[in-house]
Image (spheres, rainbow, N blue to C red):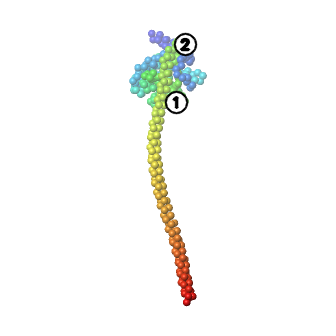
């Protein structure tokens, strides 16, 4: 029996080695076209297995290892995922997942048992209702335990029904825009609808996220404008009050100046009149003095005429 199992394992290994360097031909594209020099292929069987595994993991993070190989073709790296091993004995919380020593022991035993000539090409973990991203803790795990240039991260949110791959690009872990689901030639791939819905959900969530961000920015801008408007109104009111105060002060000053000018005008007129009156009085006095001697002379002349008349009569 042991020899028969060994022969079967060897036959599977030989078949795998025969096709391990050939890219899958029966594929379905999920998401957008990937422009980078790396592509990710995941078998339909493993894809469905992972989604069955994650669908009820809605409280704490759970995960496992992605098993497969890497095929280089035309200078591009193609990461082929052929297997999934649950990360048993791991410790999960709603926001973190820790692979214990027992977890690694179990994974390596499973690789030896089921996936000869293949290796760990990445890891998968859930984000229950937190969306698709790599937290700082996730990046720490990626940088320390999956730092090979062709090792990837796969994130699944079983509540929002969205997913996403991450891979190393220029020594940075970046989001992969799309991937491929594959199967043997002639086998129908039935994940199209679910995947399209997932892709639509990703797009809708992204749009919703952008809308929420835009709404937040608009709301913040409105609040800032209201505050600025309130502050501007206060400043305008203060300026108007200051303007009214200055106007009243200017009017009062102008009125006072007009009164002063009128008073000065009256004083000036009085001074002019005072200055002109003494000259008139002096002129009248001189006229009286000149007219008085003429009257005296006439009287004296009359008296002289009378005396002369008297002398003649004598």
Which corner quadrant holds the C terminus?
bottom right
* Local SS, label 2: loop
**What's the CA distance linking mark 1 and mark 2?**
35 Å
Contact (CB < 8 A) between labels 1 and 2? Answer: no
Residue 125, quarter of the rendered image: top left
Residue occupying the point 46% across, 32% down: 216
Residue 224: x %, y % from top left: 46, 38
Badge 2: few (under 14), some or many (20 or more) residues near its Cα, within 10 Å? few
Q: Is any part of residue 234 visible from this angle?
A: yes
The extreme right residue here reads 74
Q: Which residue is mark 2?
A: 185
Residue 91: x %, y % from top left: 40, 25
Residue 30: x %, y % from top left: 52, 20
> Residue 194 or 94: which is nearer the viewer?
194
Which corner quadrant holds the N terminus?
top left
Badge 1: few (under 14), some or many (20 or more) residues near its Cα, within 10 Å? few
- Which comes sooner in the sequence, label 1 or label 2? 1
Residue 103, quarter of the rendered image: top left
Residue occupying the point 52% across, 68% down: 276
Residue 101: x %, y % from top left: 42, 25
Disc assigned to residue 157: none
Residue occupying the point 51% across, 69% down: 277
Residue occupying the point 48% across, 64% down: 267
The extreme bottom residue here reads 314
Q: Which residue is mark 1?
A: 172
* Local SS, label 1: strand
In this picture, is 248 found above or below 263? Answer: above
Q: Is any part of residue 82 visible from this angle?
A: no
């Amino acid at each position: 029996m042991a020899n028969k199992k060994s022969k079967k394992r060897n036959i599977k290994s030989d078949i795998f080695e025969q096709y391990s360097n050939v890219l899958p031909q029966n594929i379905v594209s999920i998401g957008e076209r990937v422009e980078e020099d790396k592509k990710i292929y995941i078998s339909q069987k493993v894809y469905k297995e992972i989604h069955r595994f994650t669908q009820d993991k809605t409280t704490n993070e759970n995960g496992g290892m992605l098993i497969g190989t890497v095929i280089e073709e035309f200078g591009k790296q193609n990461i082929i995922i052929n297997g999934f091993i649950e990360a048993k004995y791991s410790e999960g919380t709603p926001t973190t997942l820790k692979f214990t020593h027992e977890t690694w022991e179990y994974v390596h035993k499973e690789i030896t048992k089921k996936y000869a000539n293949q290796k760990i090409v990445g890891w998968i973990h859930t984000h229950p209702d937190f969306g698709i991203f790599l937290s700082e803790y996730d990046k720490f795990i990626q940088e320390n335990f999956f730092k090979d240039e062709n090792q990837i991260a796969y994130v699944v949110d079983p509540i929002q029904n969205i997913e996403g791959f991450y891979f190393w690009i220029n020594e940075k872990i970046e989001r992969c825009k799309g991937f491929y689901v594959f199967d043997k030639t002639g086998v129908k791939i039935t994940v199209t609808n679910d995947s399209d819905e997932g892709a639509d959900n990703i797009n809708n969530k992204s749009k919703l996220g952008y809308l929420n961000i835009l709404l937040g920015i608009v709301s913040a801008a409105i609040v800032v404008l209201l505050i600025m408007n309130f502050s501007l109104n206060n400043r305008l009111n203060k300026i108007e009050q200051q303007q009214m105060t200055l106007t009243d002060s200017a009017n009062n000053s102008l009125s006072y100046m007009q009164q002063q000018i009128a008073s000065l005008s009256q004083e000036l007129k009085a001074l002019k009149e005072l200055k002109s009156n003494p000259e008139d009085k002096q002129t009248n006095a001189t006229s009286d003095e000149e007219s008085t001697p003429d009257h005296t002379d006439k009287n004296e002349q009359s008296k002289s005429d009378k005396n002369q008349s008297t002398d003649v009569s004598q």
